[in-house]
């Protein structure tokens, strides 16, 4: 079992930045591919970014490439999402998730076994 707790959400104006954090507890954090997803009102949950167990590989959905950066610190059991140049369409609840058993980056939410409670990001124009 892995417990995930997100933080760092908030309200910003378009063009602003936020840094989301997700603290993990339970099993060995470095065993898990980690991902960030988001869900806007009346929309399905969508993949945002994923990072390999070592942190050496990352993958992003096209809409955030060049603006968002996923990273992890396995010594702190934490994964981050640095979100820059935010747009109103980035408004959503952001969730972190842990995928297992896999050594590859995965984008489908069905491959992720553990989820945090989410943190709200609101971007105003």
Image (cartoon, grey):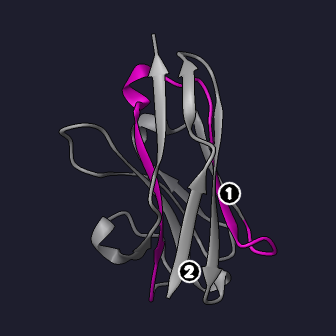
| Total tally of numbered discs in the picture | 2
Q: Secondary structure at mark 1?
A: strand
17 on left or right of 35: right
Residue 90 location, quadrant: top left
Measured from the top left, where is residue 118 in percent x and y? 45, 53
Check the image and report above or below for 112 versus 50.
below
Residue 97 vs 120, above or below: the answer is below
Specify the farthest residue to the right: 75
N-terminal-most mark, 2 or 1 = 2
In the image, residue 82 lies in the stretch drawn in magenta: yes
The residue located at (18%, 39%) in the rendering is 42
Q: Callout 2: few (<14), some (14-19), or many (20+) C-alpha neighbours within 10 Å?
A: many
Instruction: Return the residue at label 1.
Output: 71
For label 2, the residue is: 32
Q: CA distance from mark 2 to mark 1?
A: 13 Å
Question: Does the magenta run of residues contain 58?
Answer: no
- Name which quarter of the figure residue 29 lies in: bottom right
Q: Position of residue 60 (x, y in %)?
A: 48, 50
Q: Helix or strand or loop: what does disc 2 sit on?
A: loop
Residue lying farthest to the top in this orientation: 125
Question: Is disc 1 surrounded by few (<14), some (14 to 19) or many (20+) residues within 10 Å?
Answer: many
Give, as a single range, the part of the protein colored magenta. 73-101
Task: Classify the position of the C terminus by image quarter.
Answer: top left
Above or below: residue 18 compared with residue 15: below
Identify the residue at image location x=20%, y=41%. 43
Q: Residue at x 64, y 28 (%)?
A: 17
Give the x, y percent position of residue 96: 49, 60
């Amino acid at each position: 079992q892995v417990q995930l707790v997100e933080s760092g959400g908030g309200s910003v104006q378009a063009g602003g930045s936020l840094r989301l954090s997700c603290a993990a507890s339970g099993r060995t954090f470095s065993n898990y591919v980690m991902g960030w997803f988001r869900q806007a009102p009346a929309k399905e949950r969508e993949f945002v970014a994923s990072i390999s167990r070592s942190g050496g590989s990352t993958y992003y959905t096209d809409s955030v490439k060049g603006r968002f950066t996923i990273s992890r610190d396995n010594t702190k059991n934490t994964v981050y999402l640095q979100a820059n140049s935010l747009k109103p369409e980035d408004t959503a609840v952001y969730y972190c998730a842990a995928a297992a058993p896999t050594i590859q980056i995965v984008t489908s939410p069905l491959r992720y076994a553990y989820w945090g409670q989410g943190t709200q990001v609101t971007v105003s124009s």
